[in-house]
Image (cartoon, rainbow, N blue to C red):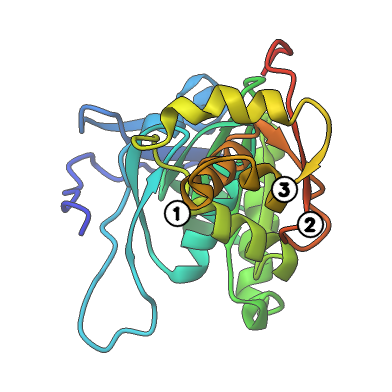
Amino acid sequence: MTPPRPRTLRPVRMARDRAYIHYFDPGGTERLTPAGHAAAVAFEDALPAREIPSYAGQHHTPGHYWAATTDRMVGYESYLESKWMKLLDFDPEVAAFSAQPFTVEAQDAAGAWQHTPDLFVRRRDGSALLLDVKDDNRMHVPAVVQQARRTAALCEQIGWEYDMVGEPDPLRWATVSWLAGYRRPLRAGKDLTGHLRRLAQKAVPVGELVSFQPVPELARAVVYHLMWHHQLTFDQTRPLRDHTRVRAADLRRPA
């Protein structure tokens, strides 16, 4: 899994209400920065701050997800975490994201605490979102609530958004997980993209759009690829079916 990250920096003796962020830059160099300076760091490019364990019989299912947004592998600790990576990858507002991006080492009125958040998200407008992914059954565990409260307060000071998320909406997950199978760069069928977009200048059902092609099976894969990449828009609040109407997006609009 993730290569070990040996800690070489000496522990920081913190004054009350001080927080530091411990991370590894893209080159693997260990860094420690005051939380007040964190907004200037590109944590979306940071290496994982800790090793993700992998062993026989473990409850979680760790692995790696290939992100179409950044064309790189991102390690995840659980299947639930991989779901949120896929949802972030589909979000057109997301420019990049990283997993286990840093470890907070802080102290407040309740005492010293440490926490490694699950996901750091950089949006295209430059804003940042920090996510913790938790099983729905653990959302109200006192230790989890306190951790979320502390992390949210720290993010507010830095200027980031924070959220703790569980199982995603089933309909949204069904749509995104299906389209994710078509997120990779096109090889066969690449020449169909322009033609399909021209045919979809006005809203047209998916089934009708692919029927215009001599090889509908190939055209369908291209249509789903264009839907994943938001080049064909559709109503994401309804189940994805052959009668789902798609329409070519205006690619001249700024991303």
Q: In this view, does 142 lie above or below 89?
A: below
In the picture, measured across the screen, residue 235 lies left or right of residue 252, that is: right
Earlier residue among tags 2 and 3:
3
- State the mark number for residue 162: none
Contact, mark 2 vs mark 3 (Cβ under 8 Å)? no
Q: Residue at x 47, y 60 (%)?
A: 82
Q: In this view, does 142 lie above or below 123?
A: below
- State the mark number for residue 243: 2
Classed neighbour count for the residue bearing mark 2: other residues with Cα under 10 Å, few (<14), some (14–19), many (≥20): few
On the question of residue 165 being in view, the answer is no
On the question of residue 78 being in view, the answer is yes
Tell me the SS state at disc 2: loop
Q: Name the amino acid, label 1.
A: Thr
In the picture, measured across the screen, residue 171 lies left or right of residue 123, that is: right
- Give 199 or 88, whichever is nearer the viewer: 199
* Whole-percent x, y for residue 222 in the image: 51, 40
Q: Name the amino acid, label 3.
A: Glu
- State the mark number for residue 208: 3
What is the quadrant of residue 133 in the picture?
bottom right
Please tell me whether mark 2 or mark 3 is closer to you in this view. Answer: 3
Most extreme residue toward the bottom is 57
Please tell me whether mark 1 or mark 2 is closer to you in this view. Answer: 2
* Whole-percent x, y for residue 126 in the image: 62, 21
Earlier residue among tags 1 and 2:
1
- Give 174 or 82, whichever is nearer the viewer: 174
Please tell me whether mark 3 or mark 1 is closer to you in this view. Answer: 3
Residue located beneath label 1 in the image: 116
Q: Residue at x 26, y 58 (%)?
A: 51
Q: Name the amino acid, label 2.
A: His
* Whole-percent x, y for residue 202 in the image: 83, 30
Tell me the SS state at disc 1: loop
Tell me the SS state at disc 3: helix
